[in-house]
């Protein structure tokens, strides 16, 4: 497994190599001396793991709040647009993600956050081992059980879907959904579906309507982050809001 330390933080550790890495993913990892949790941040299409963590404010939050970060990187050999292949029946990328997570300290809670295709993969990862994760944040995403090929995935993005049986949380963990109701790429109804079905199953779900954001992760530059690919300036400090829902305090 190709793993690269995060050079922008004072102390970094590399996730040790695995012999298989069937998904051909790379990983950037930061482990402070004392971390209260690890956040796995899954980027969207057309993004880079490290720049997305910087732009969205996760880097700043990790430094100020004592969080570890695991940043999976999709490779162009897997998907020309660097999208995680959340819709494929193969578990190759999912297996690589779980291999990396299994190398994290066992006593640290692990949270998942993702944008767009990264959100869909984050949900799929959670559903593969729900007891391993302490919280979810899914931004402008698509329920992973909606599709098993690219054609179906594109249809699901527009909100044309049926309710898959496997998209069930069934656990009382904090789940944050965030989506612009006028998102031009991924229909808001996908997040509404998540909210309705997970609340029905007893999950603790918060849906934030990010009006005027488009298909992007919003930041308040006065607090953290910077404008970048699919990261836009806004009154919303989304990363801070997610942390508040997860940890019960405003960073």
Image (cartoon, rainbow, N blue to C red):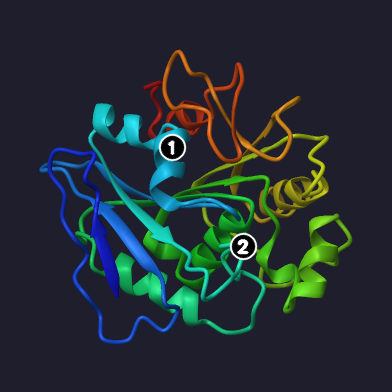
Note whether 107 is above or below 128 in the view shown.
above
Rendering coords of residue 196 (x, y %): 76, 48
The answer to whether 234 is drawn above or below residue 108 in the figure is above
Mark 2, secondary structure of its residue: loop
Identify the image quadrant of the C terminus.
Answer: top left
Looking at the picture, how far across and down is residue 87, in whole percent?
67, 72
Across and down, in percent, residue 85 comes to 60, 71
Q: Tell me, yes or no, whether the two marked residues, 1 and 2, touch with CB atoms within 8 Å.
A: no
For residue 180, side relative to residue 24 (left or right): right
Residue under label 1, please give it.
246
Decide: few, some or many residues near mark 1? Use Cα within 10 Å; few <14, some 14-19, many ≥20. some
Q: Quadrant of residue 103?
A: bottom left
Along the viewing direction, whichever of 157 and 193 lies nearer the viewer: 157
Quarter location, residue 155: bottom right
Look at discs 1 and 2 and give the one toward the viewer: 2
| Vertical placement of residue 216 versus 1, above or below | above
Give the CA separation, mark 1 to mark 2: 31 Å
Report which residue position mark 2 lands on: 81
Q: How crowded is mark 2: few (under 14 residues within 10 Å), some or many (20 or more)?
A: some
Which residue is pictured at 36% across the width and 81% down the height? 21
């Amino acid at each position: 497994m190709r793993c690269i330390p995060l050079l922008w933080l004072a102390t970094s550790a590399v996730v040790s190599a695995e012999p298989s890495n069937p998904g051909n993913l790379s990983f950037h990892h930061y482990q402070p001396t004392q971390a209260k949790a690890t956040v796995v941040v899954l980027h969207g299409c057309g993004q880079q793991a490290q720049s997305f963590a910087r732009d969205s404010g996760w880097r700043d939050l990790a430094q100020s709040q004592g969080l570890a970060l695991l940043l999976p990187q999709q490779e162009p050999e897997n998907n020309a647009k660097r999208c995680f292949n959340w819709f494929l029946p193969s578990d190759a990328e999912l297996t690589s993600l779980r291999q990396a997570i299994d190398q994290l300290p066992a006593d640290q809670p692990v949270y998942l956050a993702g944008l767009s295709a990264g959100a869909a993969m984050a949900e799929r990862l959670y559903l593969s081992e729900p007891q391993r994760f302490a919280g979810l944040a899914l931004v402008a995403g698509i329920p992973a059980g909606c599709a098993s090929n690219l054609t179906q995935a594109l249809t699901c993005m527009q909100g044309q879907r049926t309710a898959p049986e496997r998209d069930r949380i069934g656990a009382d963990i904090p789940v944050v959904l965030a989506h612009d109701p006028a998102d031009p790429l991924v229909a808001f109804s996908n997040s509404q579906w998540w909210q309705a079905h997970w609340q029905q199953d007893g999950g603790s779900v918060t849906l934030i309507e990010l009006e005027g954001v488009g298909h992007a992760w919003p930041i308040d530059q006065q607090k953290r982050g910077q404008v970048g690919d699919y990261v836009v300036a806004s009154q919303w400090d989304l990363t801070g809001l997610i942390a508040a829902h997860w940890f019960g305090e405003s960073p």
